[in-house]
Amino acid sequence: MATHDEPAVTEAVALPERLLLGSGPSPVPRRVLRALARPTIGHLDPAFGVLMEDMMGRLRRVMVTENRATLAISGTGSAGMETMVVNFVAPGDRVVCGVNGLFGERMADALTRQGATVERVEGEWGRAIATERLTAALDDRTAALFVVHGETSTGVCQPLDGLADACRERDALFLVDCVTSLGGQPLELDAAGVDVAFSGSQKCLNCPPGLAPFTLGERARDRLLSRREPCRSWYFDLRAILAYWREDAPGAPPRAYHHTAPINMIYALHESLGIVLDEGLPERWERHRRAHEALRAALEPLGLTRLAPPGEELSSLLAVVVPPHIDEAAARRQLLLDHGIEISGGLGPLAGRVWRIGVMGIGAAHEPQQRLLGALAEIFGVDPTDSLARLDDAWS
């Protein structure tokens, strides 16, 4: 039997060090990498069950919810979206969907594939959708309202105030994508009245991609249990998943096997959530806000201005308009290959026009932003003094 002391059968592929300041994944702390490397145990091992329960408790605190059904779906954030759609939307349901970016568009597509009647509330890419437009689209036939809290394609934060009350007046579920906002933008799911929400491990939580934090409240659980037909997806069937993720209690039956959970990824998410809670949510939200504003101010002398207007910005992702004289794709490539820094280009109608810069977790700090500014100034062939001074002032 091979041991770790034996030579590798094949040569390792060389992987470069990158500073990940794009739309995700985000930088992964050494604490989390060490957690990934812990010995793998079985997914039904009682010791793993203890860790799962503790992780659920940490996730409740980060999502600011008392929902018992708060867990991690095995898969990326898109797996969270699929889980939401196939369990809480039935063919023929009328669903109101806010669409002001790629991820609202993606949800509308997923709902359509599920057979829902989708009432799209369109918004300008780069702007939040007015609350009254979303609530006006609801009626007594509406099964659910969906919005993206942090739109990764535009750097816009969608206000949630008033949406839950409007949904409850019509017995509709309130569904939210908080992939890029969780852990970096003020968000209290219970206070906002959210019935179902999903996120991703690879954004502000600074964990590798591969898990989708997910929570559902009692209204949603009642809807789930009252379904007459089985979920169309075997893998994302929440009834079966919850039988595995349920908390152990005296006299309760053992966890039911559904699929082999990504054990080491759950180690990593558990550690990532611990880092968030060590800092404290209010302090973390404020650090992300401050980091966003510091980078926004420092990029302006380079001709890069924020897409979102004041009051609609997403702290964890800064989308900036690139000046027409800059070949944005060539500059991003040079930034990656010559300086080891990744940022993201625009999507959809914003392709070729904007850059999306992550301000996530340990990336929301002075040193990585200073490194980015110096590299961009070199690529643009300009003096970085003004930009760096603005950054230093904002962080001092």
Image (cartoon, helix red, strand yellow):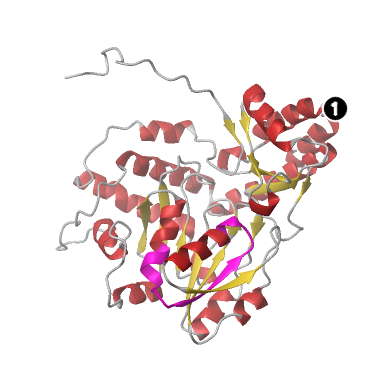
Image quarter in which the C terminus is found: top right
Residue 345 in the magenta stretch? The answer is: no
Question: Measuring 68% from the left and 53% from the top, which residue is drawn there?
Answer: 349
Residue 344, image quadrant: top right
Write down the region rendered in magenta. Answer: 84-104
Q: Could you tell whether 254 is left or right of 228 in the image?
A: left
Residue 27, image quadrant: top right
Q: Could you tell whether 64 is left or right of 72 in the image?
A: right
Q: How many marks?
A: 1
Q: Could you tell whether 367 is left or right of 233 in the image?
A: right
On screen, 162 above or below 36?
Answer: below
Residue 86 in the magenta stretch? The answer is: yes
Foreground pick, 224 / 347: 347
What's under tag 1, amino acid-wise?
A: Asp
On screen, 134 above or below 305?
Answer: below
Residue 154 can be seen in this image = no
Foreground pick, 305 / 207: 305
Question: Measuring 58% from the left and 48% from the top, which residue is drawn there?
Answer: 284
Expressed as whole percent of the image width and height from the top left, the position of residue 265 reads: 36, 41
Residue 374 can be seen in this image = yes
Circle 1 sits on which residue?
383
Disc 1 crowd rating (10 Å Cα; few below 14, some 14-19, many 20+) is: few
On screen, 269 above or below 128?
Answer: above
